[in-house]
């Protein structure tokens, strides 16, 4: 599928220099397609600046930019509906999640959950929304789950966590110095740690006992059409489904004890 040039440009907007912003505005305002010489004169920028702009948005040259620009401008209301686009994006995300599935890793993740009754879920921003879903699901099967989303509370929890407790860390990008510091502290205290991330080169991985790999976003998905917590939620749903399959007996015992306590 050809990428939409307008989305490509917007996805790099924060990385542009002032000159590149001028070039970006020209195309985003859907001005006439010009040769590189004419565009250079029209905007009073050098041809090398235009070429660098093309590289910045991930294209090989100006010719490729103009091709995509003309193609994107031809798209009208007869194209795919918003529903079709989002459905296709979700399907692609689910497919990438399935391709990275490892039952061995999921079972190890579940085993850690099974061995610990008290669970600290570390997740900032949208990761904390996924944590709320995790809390809801696993509280129903007898776990005490705390969702912690700010730096100071995360550090305090990492410091006070005991060996019979579990820390679950959710970080889609996997690059966070404060989380790294918290995980390093908890690991030094002998606390078990599970990690969910989409970054296979994450600085957090060395401090985790189990690493569950979520699907990453494409550049277009990362612009916000798809809720950013979805890749994490998919992994948590997989874990929950596998957990209730592996530990059905324990779940029945817990449920029966809850009934007795309520009587």
Image (spheres, rainbow, N blue to C red):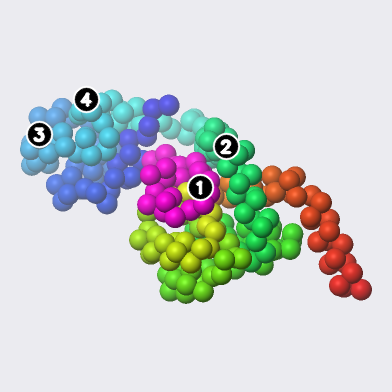
Q: The residue tagged with tag 4: helix, strand or loop?
A: helix
Mark identifier at residue 47:
3
- What is the x, y in percent for residue 128? 53, 62
Q: Badge 3 local density, few (<14 within 10 Å), some, or many (20+)? A: some
Res. 57 image quadrant: top left
Pointer 2: what residue?
Answer: 101
Q: The residue tagged with tag 3: helix, strand or loop?
A: helix
Does the residue at mark 3 contact the one at mark 1 (Cβ under 8 Å)?
A: no
Does the residue at mark 4 contact the one at mark 3 (Cβ under 8 Å)?
A: no
Q: Badge 4 local density, few (<14 within 10 Å), some, or many (20+)? A: some
* Mark 4 or 1, nearer chain start: 4
Does the residue at mark 4 contact the one at mark 1 (Cβ under 8 Å)?
A: no
Pointer 1: what residue?
Answer: 211
- Horizontally, is 138 left or right of 224 in the view? right
* Mark 2 or 4, nearer chain start: 4
Q: Nearer the viewer, residue 161 or 237?
A: 161
Confirm whether residue 136 shows in the render.
no
**Which range is magenta?**
198-220
Q: Mark 2 or mark 1, which is nearer to you? A: 1
Residue 206 in magenta stretch:
yes
* Mark 3 or 1, nearer chain start: 3
Mark identifier at residue 63:
4
Residues at marks 2 and 1, CA–CA distance in whole angstroms: 12 Å
* Mark 2 or 3, nearer chain start: 3
Q: Residue at x 56, y 69 (%)?
A: 162
């Amino acid at each position: 599928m050809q990428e939409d040039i307008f989305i490509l440009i917007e996805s790099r907007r924060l990385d542009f220099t002032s000159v590149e912003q001028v070039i970006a505005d020209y195309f985003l305002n859907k001005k006439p397609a010009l040769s590189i010489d004419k565009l250079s004169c029209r905007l009073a920028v050098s041809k090398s600046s235009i070429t660098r702009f093309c590289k910045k948005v991930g294209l090989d040259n100006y010719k490729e930019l103009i091709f995509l620009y003309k193609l994107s401008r031809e798209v009208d209301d007869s194209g795919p509906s918003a529903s079709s686009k989002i459905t296709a994006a979700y399907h692609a995300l689910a497919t990438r999640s399935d391709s990275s599935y490892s039952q061995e890793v999921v079972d190890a993740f579940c085993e850690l959950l099974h061995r610990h009754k008290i669970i600290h879920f570390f997740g900032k921003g949208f990761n904390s929304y996924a944590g709320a879903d995790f809390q809801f699901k696993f509280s129903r099967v007898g776990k005490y789950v705390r969702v912690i989303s700010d730096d100071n509370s995360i550090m305090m929890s990492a410091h006070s966590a005991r060996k019979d407790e579990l820390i679950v860390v959710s970080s889609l990008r996997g690059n966070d110095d404060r989380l790294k510091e918290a995980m390093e502290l908890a690991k030094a205290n002998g606390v078990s740690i599970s990690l969910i991330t989409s970054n296979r080169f994450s600085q957090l991985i060395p401090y985790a006992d189990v690493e569950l790999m979520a699907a990453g976003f494409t550049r277009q998905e990362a612009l916000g059409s798809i809720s950013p917590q979805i890749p994490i939620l998919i992994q948590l749903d997989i874990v929950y489904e596998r957990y209730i399959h592996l530990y059905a007996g324990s779940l029945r015992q817990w449920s029966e004890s809850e009934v007795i306590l309520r009587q």
